[in-house]
Image: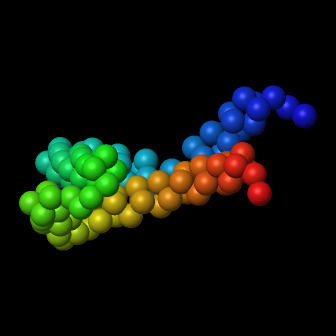
Amino acid sequence: MSNIYDQAHILAKSLKASPEYTNYLAVKAKVDTKPELAEMLNDFQEKSIQVQAQQMMGGGEAPQEAMAQIQNLYGILMRDPLAMEYLQAEFAFTRMVSDVYKIIGDAVKGE
């Protein structure tokens, strides 16, 4: 049997060759040509991560003001077809990676 690291490299190559990843990269390249849109998407993602971190650390609800900002930004972004395409592509890739982590986690956790 091959080395676990060899298997990890094979998995990494498979992830990079996946339609989810190649689509994400293609859409990201389009977004990168529009600095204003890229900045809005980054701002949305940073705020979302901050709220998620607050919820995880404090175990409670996110501040209403932060949630309102995120919802407002999301509403603005959803009006832009490219932003919507980017968020959907990012979500599809992230979901795939999350599924892989779950499979690995379930395998090492045992029955």
Q: Residue at x 64, y 49 (%)?
A: 105
Indicate the quadrant where residue 76 lies. bottom left
Furthest-left residue in view? 65
Rendering coords of residue 92 (x, y %): 47, 61
Q: Residue at x 31, y 46 (%)?
A: 57
Rendering coords of residue 32 (x, y %): 27, 44
Q: Residue at x 50, y 59 (%)?
A: 95
Residue closest to the eye, 76 or 59:
59
Q: Quadrant of the C terminus?
A: bottom right
Furthest-right residue in view? 1
Q: Is residue 77 visible?
A: no
Q: In screen coordinates, is 82 left or right of 21?
A: left
Q: Residue at x 68, y 42 (%)?
A: 11
Q: Is residue 24 visible?
A: yes
Rendering coords of residue 41 (x, y %): 23, 52
Rendering coords of residue 54 (x, y %): 26, 49
